[in-house]
Image (tube, helix red, strand yellow):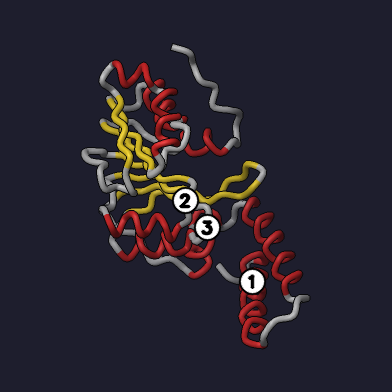
Amino acid sequence: MRQKTFGGEGGRIPQICARLQKCSVFADVGCDHGYCAQYMLQSNLCERAIISDISQKSLNKAVKLLSDYAAQGRLSAVCCDGLSKVEGADLVLIAGMGGEEIVKILKDGYIPPAFVFQPMKNADLLRAYLIENGCAIEEDGIFKDNKFYFIIKGRAHGGTPAYSQAALSFGRDSLGNPLLKEYLSQEIDKTQAYLNSRMSEQNRSALNSKLAFLKGVHSGEIT
Protein backbone atom coordinates (compact mmCIF):
# COMPACT_ATOMS: atom_id res chain seq x y z
CA MET A 1 0.00 0.00 0.00
CA ARG A 2 1.33 3.43 -0.87
CA GLN A 3 2.22 5.35 2.25
CA LYS A 4 0.90 8.86 2.77
CA THR A 5 3.08 11.69 4.03
CA PHE A 6 0.99 13.87 6.29
CA GLY A 7 3.12 16.99 6.13
CA GLY A 8 5.62 18.69 8.39
CA GLU A 9 5.33 19.81 11.96
CA GLY A 10 2.69 22.47 12.37
CA GLY A 11 0.52 21.48 9.39
CA ARG A 12 -3.22 21.35 10.03
CA ILE A 13 -3.69 17.62 9.35
CA PRO A 14 -0.60 16.55 11.36
CA GLN A 15 -1.71 18.78 14.23
CA ILE A 16 -5.13 17.12 14.26
CA CYS A 17 -3.67 13.62 13.96
CA ALA A 18 -1.31 14.30 16.87
CA ARG A 19 -4.39 14.54 19.13
CA LEU A 20 -5.84 11.20 18.04
CA GLN A 21 -5.19 8.36 20.47
CA LYS A 22 -5.40 4.59 20.13
CA CYS A 23 -8.95 3.27 20.02
CA SER A 24 -11.02 0.36 18.81
CA VAL A 25 -13.27 2.14 16.29
CA PHE A 26 -12.37 5.58 14.95
CA ALA A 27 -14.89 7.78 13.12
CA ASP A 28 -14.13 10.84 11.01
CA VAL A 29 -17.34 12.84 10.54
CA GLY A 30 -17.19 15.12 7.51
CA CYS A 31 -14.09 13.22 6.42
CA ASP A 32 -13.39 15.09 3.16
CA HIS A 33 -10.32 13.36 1.63
CA GLY A 34 -10.01 10.81 4.44
CA TYR A 35 -6.45 11.65 5.46
CA CYS A 36 -7.08 11.39 9.23
CA ALA A 37 -8.72 7.97 8.90
CA GLN A 38 -5.78 6.94 6.74
CA TYR A 39 -3.39 8.05 9.47
CA MET A 40 -5.26 6.04 12.12
CA LEU A 41 -5.42 2.88 9.99
CA GLN A 42 -1.90 3.19 8.63
CA SER A 43 -0.50 3.70 12.14
CA ASN A 44 -2.56 0.81 13.54
CA LEU A 45 -4.12 3.16 16.07
CA CYS A 46 -7.56 1.68 15.45
CA GLU A 47 -8.91 -1.75 14.58
CA ARG A 48 -11.30 -0.21 12.09
CA ALA A 49 -12.52 3.18 10.95
CA ILE A 50 -15.79 4.76 9.88
CA ILE A 51 -15.76 7.67 7.48
CA SER A 52 -18.82 9.81 6.87
CA ASP A 53 -19.73 12.85 4.85
CA ILE A 54 -22.96 14.52 3.84
CA SER A 55 -21.58 14.72 0.29
CA GLN A 56 -21.38 11.44 -1.61
CA LYS A 57 -18.84 13.04 -3.96
CA SER A 58 -16.50 13.89 -1.08
CA LEU A 59 -17.05 10.48 0.47
CA ASN A 60 -16.13 8.79 -2.80
CA LYS A 61 -12.72 10.52 -2.76
CA ALA A 62 -11.99 9.14 0.70
CA VAL A 63 -13.27 5.66 -0.22
CA LYS A 64 -10.91 5.61 -3.21
CA LEU A 65 -7.95 6.62 -1.04
CA LEU A 66 -8.80 3.98 1.57
CA SER A 67 -9.97 1.20 -0.75
CA ASP A 68 -7.33 -1.28 0.50
CA TYR A 69 -8.59 -0.92 4.06
CA ALA A 70 -12.18 -1.41 2.90
CA ALA A 71 -11.10 -4.64 1.17
CA GLN A 72 -9.57 -5.78 4.47
CA GLY A 73 -12.85 -5.12 6.28
CA ARG A 74 -11.30 -2.33 8.35
CA LEU A 75 -13.22 0.57 6.80
CA SER A 76 -16.89 1.50 6.59
CA ALA A 77 -18.21 4.50 4.67
CA VAL A 78 -21.60 6.11 5.28
CA CYS A 79 -23.15 9.07 3.52
CA CYS A 80 -25.14 10.86 6.19
CA ASP A 81 -25.77 14.09 8.04
CA GLY A 82 -23.60 14.32 11.14
CA LEU A 83 -23.65 11.27 13.41
CA SER A 84 -26.97 9.88 12.19
CA LYS A 85 -25.45 6.67 10.77
CA VAL A 86 -22.20 6.59 12.75
CA GLU A 87 -22.46 3.79 15.32
CA GLY A 88 -20.01 2.04 17.61
CA ALA A 89 -17.14 4.54 17.47
CA ASP A 90 -15.22 5.11 20.68
CA LEU A 91 -13.27 8.07 19.21
CA VAL A 92 -14.86 10.64 16.89
CA LEU A 93 -13.16 13.43 14.98
CA ILE A 94 -15.10 16.39 13.63
CA ALA A 95 -12.84 18.93 11.95
CA GLY A 96 -13.26 21.81 9.53
CA MET A 97 -16.82 22.81 10.50
CA GLY A 98 -18.10 25.76 12.48
CA GLY A 99 -18.58 25.35 16.22
CA GLU A 100 -22.29 26.02 15.87
CA GLU A 101 -22.55 23.26 13.26
CA ILE A 102 -20.67 20.82 15.50
CA VAL A 103 -23.04 21.63 18.38
CA LYS A 104 -26.01 20.89 16.11
CA ILE A 105 -24.46 17.54 15.13
CA LEU A 106 -24.02 16.64 18.80
CA LYS A 107 -27.54 17.75 19.72
CA ASP A 108 -29.08 15.80 16.85
CA GLY A 109 -26.92 12.77 17.60
CA TYR A 110 -24.82 12.19 20.71
CA ILE A 111 -21.60 13.21 22.42
CA PRO A 112 -19.00 10.53 21.56
CA PRO A 113 -17.16 8.65 24.36
CA ALA A 114 -13.93 10.39 23.24
CA PHE A 115 -13.63 13.22 20.74
CA VAL A 116 -11.36 15.64 18.93
CA PHE A 117 -13.08 18.73 17.53
CA GLN A 118 -11.43 21.37 15.37
CA PRO A 119 -13.98 24.18 14.90
CA MET A 120 -13.32 26.77 12.19
CA LYS A 121 -15.34 29.48 13.99
CA ASN A 122 -17.62 29.93 17.01
CA ALA A 123 -15.41 27.69 19.13
CA ASP A 124 -16.81 29.41 22.24
CA LEU A 125 -20.28 28.00 21.53
CA LEU A 126 -18.84 24.50 21.30
CA ARG A 127 -16.83 24.87 24.52
CA ALA A 128 -19.91 26.12 26.38
CA TYR A 129 -22.00 23.20 25.12
CA LEU A 130 -19.40 20.61 26.12
CA ILE A 131 -18.97 22.10 29.61
CA GLU A 132 -22.73 22.42 30.15
CA ASN A 133 -23.15 18.74 29.24
CA GLY A 134 -20.55 17.43 31.67
CA CYS A 135 -17.75 16.64 29.25
CA ALA A 136 -14.14 16.38 30.40
CA ILE A 137 -12.08 18.74 28.25
CA GLU A 138 -8.52 17.39 28.27
CA GLU A 139 -6.95 19.81 25.80
CA ASP A 140 -8.25 23.11 24.52
CA GLY A 141 -5.62 25.05 22.64
CA ILE A 142 -4.50 26.88 19.53
CA PHE A 143 -2.15 26.08 16.67
CA LYS A 144 -1.10 27.79 13.46
CA ASP A 145 -0.82 26.58 9.90
CA ASN A 146 -0.81 29.85 7.91
CA LYS A 147 -4.09 30.55 9.72
CA PHE A 148 -4.92 30.07 13.39
CA TYR A 149 -7.00 27.11 14.52
CA PHE A 150 -8.52 26.02 17.82
CA ILE A 151 -8.64 22.35 18.77
CA ILE A 152 -10.56 20.63 21.58
CA LYS A 153 -9.94 17.11 22.84
CA GLY A 154 -11.92 15.36 25.54
CA ARG A 155 -14.37 12.75 26.75
CA ALA A 156 -18.12 12.62 27.19
CA HIS A 157 -18.01 12.26 30.97
CA GLY A 158 -15.93 13.55 33.86
CA GLY A 159 -16.78 17.24 33.92
CA THR A 160 -14.66 20.34 33.42
CA PRO A 161 -14.09 23.11 35.98
CA ALA A 162 -15.81 26.38 35.10
CA TYR A 163 -14.09 28.46 32.43
CA SER A 164 -13.32 32.15 32.65
CA GLN A 165 -14.68 34.31 29.83
CA ALA A 166 -11.22 34.44 28.25
CA ALA A 167 -10.88 30.64 28.38
CA LEU A 168 -14.35 30.23 26.92
CA SER A 169 -13.54 32.62 24.08
CA PHE A 170 -10.06 31.38 23.18
CA GLY A 171 -9.46 28.04 24.89
CA ARG A 172 -8.17 27.26 28.36
CA ASP A 173 -4.79 26.01 27.13
CA SER A 174 -4.38 28.88 24.68
CA LEU A 175 -4.04 31.37 27.53
CA GLY A 176 -0.35 32.09 28.00
CA ASN A 177 0.55 30.61 24.61
CA PRO A 178 2.49 33.15 22.48
CA LEU A 179 0.40 32.06 19.49
CA LEU A 180 -2.69 33.45 21.18
CA LYS A 181 -1.04 36.87 21.51
CA GLU A 182 -0.28 36.77 17.80
CA TYR A 183 -3.87 35.79 17.05
CA LEU A 184 -5.24 38.52 19.34
CA SER A 185 -3.03 41.14 17.71
CA GLN A 186 -4.60 40.29 14.35
CA GLU A 187 -8.11 40.41 15.82
CA ILE A 188 -7.39 43.77 17.47
CA ASP A 189 -6.18 45.20 14.15
CA LYS A 190 -9.28 43.88 12.34
CA THR A 191 -11.63 45.27 14.96
CA GLN A 192 -9.96 48.69 14.90
CA ALA A 193 -10.25 48.72 11.11
CA TYR A 194 -13.97 47.92 11.34
CA LEU A 195 -14.43 50.82 13.73
CA ASN A 196 -13.35 53.17 10.95
CA SER A 197 -16.42 52.10 8.94
CA ARG A 198 -19.86 53.66 9.10
CA MET A 199 -22.18 51.77 11.43
CA SER A 200 -24.96 52.21 13.95
CA GLU A 201 -24.08 53.40 17.44
CA GLN A 202 -25.25 50.04 18.77
CA ASN A 203 -22.80 48.17 16.55
CA ARG A 204 -20.03 50.64 17.39
CA SER A 205 -20.63 50.13 21.10
CA ALA A 206 -20.50 46.34 20.67
CA LEU A 207 -17.24 46.59 18.70
CA ASN A 208 -15.69 48.86 21.31
CA SER A 209 -16.60 46.32 24.00
CA LYS A 210 -15.08 43.54 21.91
CA LEU A 211 -11.92 45.59 21.37
CA ALA A 212 -11.54 46.27 25.08
CA PHE A 213 -11.92 42.55 25.79
CA LEU A 214 -9.36 41.57 23.14
CA LYS A 215 -6.87 44.10 24.48
CA GLY A 216 -7.48 42.93 28.05
CA VAL A 217 -6.77 39.29 27.19
CA HIS A 218 -3.76 40.30 25.09
CA SER A 219 -2.25 42.30 27.96
CA GLY A 220 -3.03 39.62 30.53
CA GLU A 221 -5.33 41.89 32.50
CA ILE A 222 -8.23 39.56 31.61
CA THR A 223 -7.52 35.88 32.22
Q: Distance between the residues labelled 3 and 1?
A: 21 Å
Pointer 1 residue:
216
Residue at the spot 43% in from the left edge and 61% down from the top edge? 100
Work out which quarter of the rendered image holds the N terminus and state it.
top left
Q: Which type of secondary structure does the marked residue at label 2 adopt?
A: loop
Amino acid type, mark 3: Lys
Q: Can you tell which quarter of the image residue 220 is in? A: bottom right
Q: Residue reaching furthest front?
A: 57
Q: Which of 192 and 164 is in front in this view?
A: 192
Query: In this rendering, would 95 be left or right of 197?
Result: left
Q: Which of marks 1 and 2 is nearer the N terminus?
A: 2
Pointer 3 residue:
121
Image vertical order of residue 169 relative to residue 135, above or below? below
Find residue 216 and report its horizontal and vertical position in percent. Answer: 64, 71
Image vertical order of residue 129 relative to residue 10, above or below? below
Residue depth check, mark 3 versus mark 1: number of the one nearer the observer: 3
Residue neighbourhood size for the residue with mark 1, other residues' Cα within 10 Å, grouped as few (<14), some (14–19), many (≥20):
some
Q: Residue reaching furthest right?
A: 196
Q: Which of 198 and 49 is in front in this view?
A: 198
Find residue 27 and report its horizontal and vertical position in percent. Answer: 33, 37
Pointer 2 residue:
97
